[in-house]
Amino acid sequence: MIDLALLRDNPDLVKRSQEARGESPDTVDAAVAADHARRAAITTFEELRAAQNAHGKRVAQAPKEEKAALVAEAKELSARVKSAQQAVTDAEEAASEALARIENIVIEGVPAGGEDAFVTLRTHGEIPRFDFAPRDHLALAEKLGAIDMERGAKVSGARFTFLTGIGARLEMALMNLGMERALAAGFVPMIPPTLVRSEVMRGTGFLGQHADEVYRLDDDDLYLVGTSEVPLAGYHMDEILDLSAGAKRYAGWSTCYRREAGSHGKDTRGIIRLHQFNKLEMFVFTTPEDAEAEHLRLVEMQEAMLRDLGLSYRVIDVAAGDLGSSAARKYDIEAWVPTQDAYRELTSTSNCTTYQARRLNVRHRPAAADGAAAKTTPVATLNGTLATTRWIVAILETHQREDGSVVIPEVLRPYLGGLEVAEPIA
């Protein structure tokens, strides 16, 4: 949820944010009204409870001849209190529903509009050119014995695969390189659970507009995560963090699952859009004041990985309508995929400000200027990809040779026993 004080004091700002996302400003008016009704219901209930308590003392102290009438009044008052309590419950549910339709407030400068309204911030590297007809990543992978889509579909269905031989080794090399760099940057390595409770999935914002992407185990009320962001966000749920020594940074390596609902006919060839993949996700808890600087730090870590892998890419400032409900700003890094003649997303990193922390009740206690204990306040959360299965697409296509072999980026060779070139198998 957003800051209720901001909603009450500056609803026009919230409306502008909703409009930038392509949402109706009416959602803000509805949320303000629902919040007002909730507070009014609570006030009525508390006044009746106070009257009931005072009346109870009168009954206890009244003479015997007055008790019967007072007891009758007490019963009537009790019924009114019970009704008022139910009204509070109803008002709180209505307010929660209305507030859930308010997405995180976009940061000033984020471009308004939908998916195509992004702004390119910078590009890196020359577009790869070949003096032969380049193969796409799946054709290369099949020659290398790296990917087996046919057997993946036989075992599990469409959009599943086996990474085999050098394909499996490449993915593990990418993950290990990313984890090593995360460790050097002060991140705590984590292998988190990939099944989470509904309150964690909801708290991170994945049961809103992304609900149709999520796999659910109905009998257990558990959800398969589409990113380690979800369990890592829940790691400190209902806790007060000590951030006096700096941010808490985690790097979660996990298998991820996405239904890819609505993507029928899109990227059906190869491994760009799978139901199951591996990902190394950075996640940070920090103070709201430091969140934007931390966001840029995560992007630089991602860019360093892609530069060292020899990939050409661009960094984009994602438009408000394509952010997702939790993100206040998101930077995507898209690598050039030669056979598609286009940039394709390899990483995202989002500043979720205090939106997720408010929903998951993750707070910290800022240092007070006068030395007194300060009131707790929500932390800011950020997330960003440091390696994932999809990167293999750009690596194979960018570094291919005419005979179908692929030059291994130098930074990955130590994780592959010094292998310099992946050769086609017989």
Image (cartoon, rainbow, N blue to C red):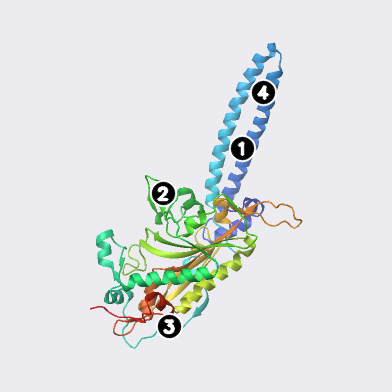
- The residue where tag 4 is placed is 56
Residue 175: which quarter of the image?
Answer: bottom left
The Cα–Cα distance between marks 2 and 1, rounded to whole angstroms, is: 34 Å
Residue 249: which quarter of the image?
Answer: bottom right
How many residues crowd around disc 4 within 10 Å: few (fewer than 14), some, or many (20 or more)? Answer: some
Q: Nearer the viewer, mark 4 or mark 3?
A: 4
Instruction: Judge by depth and name the residue closer to the eye, 379 or 4.
Output: 379
Q: Is there a contact, CB below 8 Å, between mark 3 and mark 2?
A: no
- The residue where tag 2 is placed is 222
Q: Is there a contact, CB below 8 Å, between mark 2 and mark 4?
A: no
Q: Secondary structure at mark 4?
A: helix
The Cα–Cα distance between marks 4 and 1, rounded to whole angstroms, is: 22 Å
Which numbered dot is residue 41?
1
Q: Secondary structure at mark 2?
A: strand
Q: Amino acid at mark 2?
A: Leu
- The residue where tag 3 is placed is 127
Residue lying farthest to the left in this orientation: 426
- Tell me, yes or no, if residue 191 can be seen here: yes
The Cα–Cα distance between marks 2 and 4, rounded to whole angstroms, is: 46 Å
Lower position in the chain sequence, tag 4 or tag 3? 4
